[in-house]
Amino acid sequence: MNIEIKNDLENDQMIVSVSVEKKKFSRDTTETFMWKNVLKLLEGYIPPNGYELGNCEVTNQKVDNNYDDRLHRDWTFELVKKASAKNPKKSTAATKKAASKQAQKSEA
């Protein structure tokens, strides 16, 4: 089983690619990989700086080496940019000045 995790920052995506080889004989073990396995795999995943892991587009897929059309699957997740922590706040001197001006107006 080949598992690859790729960060595609140009398209803001993270892709989990899983592929297996076709089962040749019935005595060979069956290899499967499902959504619950993707979740276990991502427990230790750390997104790139400035991003958070978003939702997966399609979750109901399965890799299975019994079928030719299920030998490879991609799970595509959104990479959501984090909001910047900068808040444009007025300095305390500016707010005190504005408060004193309002107080003078109300007294008059």
Image (tube, helix red, strand yellow):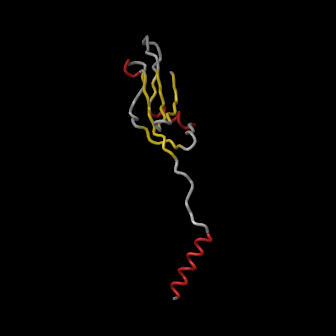
Above or below for 99 versus 81? below
Q: Determine the residue positioned at 52% across, 30% down.
A: 5
| Residue 26 in which image quadrant | top left
In this orientation, which residue lies closer to the viewer: 36 or 56?
Answer: 56
Above or below for 78 versus 107? above
In this orientation, which residue lies closer to the viewer: 52 or 9?
Answer: 9
Q: Determine the residue positioned at 62% across, 70% down.
A: 92
In this orientation, which residue lies closer to the viewer: 6 or 16?
Answer: 6
Q: Position of residue 79 (x, y in %)?
A: 48, 40
Q: Residue furthest bottom?
A: 108
Above or below for 81 versus 98? above
Q: Residue furthest right?
A: 93
Q: Position of residue 4 (x, y in %)?
A: 52, 27
Count of all numbered marks drawn on residues in the image? 0
Q: Position of residue 68 (x, y in %)?
A: 38, 17
In this orientation, which residue lies closer to the viewer: 70 or 81?
Answer: 81
Q: Position of residue 52 (x, y in %)?
A: 52, 43
